[in-house]
Image: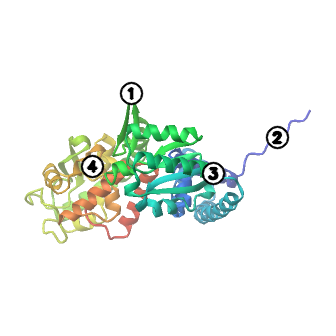
Amino acid sequence: MSIMAFAPPSKDGVLLALGIIGLLFHMLLRERDGQYMFQIISGHKLRVCAGQVLFMVLTLFVYLGLWRNYDVSRKMLLLFITMMGPALWLGKLLFMKFLRALGARLQPRLRILAVCDEASETATRQWFANKAMLGIHLCDVLAVENDARHESFLEHQLEQALNQGRPNLLIWRLPTDAARTEKIRLIAESHGTHLAVDLEPIVGEMGTVQLTEYLPMKLVSLHKHPLVSPAHRFLKRVLDISISLPVVVLVLPFLCVGVWILHRIYSPGPLFFKQSRSGADGQMFKIFKFRTMTVNHGRESVQARANDSRIFTGGGLMRKLSIDEMPQFLNVLLGDMSVVGPRPHMAEHDVLFAMECSQYALRHTVKPGVTGLAQVRGHRGPVDDASEIKHRVTSDIEYCQNWSFYLDLAIIARTFLHVFSFHAKSC
């Protein structure tokens, strides 16, 4: 009996398989919190494609790094990476057309009745307008006038709407309490309808809500804390070490030699500048930077500005290219900082900034970073007014509450673009 020999997969096949693995991994991460499909249909296809390309490229380079003897054509690799973005974009456009056609033919799985006030009726209808492709159909919106919220009248209207539309989900968008919610639930369930309560009328503009259950308590948190999860912290730490270790071992020694020579020529003195900064939970640590100012230049708490006389020749270019920040990867390895996070400030600046922005202390719920969301949005350099503080804090809190592995990768990629565009200001 002959034994059939299977030929090993081609190199092109391996590249394609690895790309698909990275694509599937990204889709699983996004769909875990229910965001993948909603981002696609909400006009965020470019953002989704960018994240998928990053994951696919990361998967490829991790594989090639582990198997260095695996010979692959550079032209093929470059062509593959270049074509991924357009191919994914085209695929999503075709997928959207397919979903629209399918949604028009199939019976919707989710038939919704929404109850809201008159002011919210238009927005509610608009939100559900293009959701047929997800199997969602809006039966009706029961818009209640302010003077028509008496229990008996409202219950009568609700009964009529449930009988006519026969929905299987009731979305309640009016203020409520435990007793009223229980009464509405019983009415809905008597018609075979599930109840979902929108918390926006309760929490308003106070923040992003997160539901947490600690038996017997059911808590509504006005802030999300993704990095409270040990799994998320572990994933972020793996990313930190994966980036900082090669930088410290392969890049930092050469930078040290170059900066040391620059110091010997223009400003002899210590190679590193060390200063106390506020870290996670307000804990102080020593931050490392390459020195860009003259020795004994005066008060360290005065922020550097453009054409600052304290910066020696060559120091300005180091700051513009963010070379002076590179030793902070030592802080990342030591665990005091992360690659991505809010920038660390001096304790006295923390006090001043907290006086201008009441939410400032929320920045300290995560480790400070070498780069951050505020920095890639252009909020860098010295702080001149209260509005600049608020812009930075808003971005920092947004990062803390919406952290994801993809977000860190996106910020790192944008940081490279900022550095090499030569428009970055000193942090």
Query: Quick one: quadrant of the C terminus?
Result: bottom left
Residue position marked by numbered label 1 in the rendering? 216
Answer with left or right where residue 176 lies relative to residue 192: left
Q: How crowded is mark 4: few (under 14 residues within 10 Å), some or many (20 or more)?
A: many
Q: Earlier in the sequence, mark 2 or mark 4?
A: 2
In front: mark 2 or mark 4? Answer: 4
Amino acid type for the residue under numbered disc 2: Ala
- Residue 16: horizontal and vertical position, in percent? 66, 54
The location of residue 20, given as percent across then percent down, is: 63, 51
Circle 1: residue type: Pro
| Circles 3, 2 touching at the beta carbon (< 8 Å) | no
Residue under the image location 61 percent in, 64 percent down: 83
* Separation (CA) of disc 3 from disc 1: 43 Å
Front of the two marks 3 and 1 = 1
Between circles 1 and 4, the one closer to the viewer is 1
Q: Which of marks 4 and 3 is nearer the N terminus?
A: 3
Report how far apart the C-alphas of labels 4 and 3 lie in the structure. 37 Å
Check whether the beta carbons of the residues at disc 1 and disc 2 lie within 8 A of each other: no
> Which residue type carries mark 4?
Arg
Name the residue that disc number 2 marks: 5
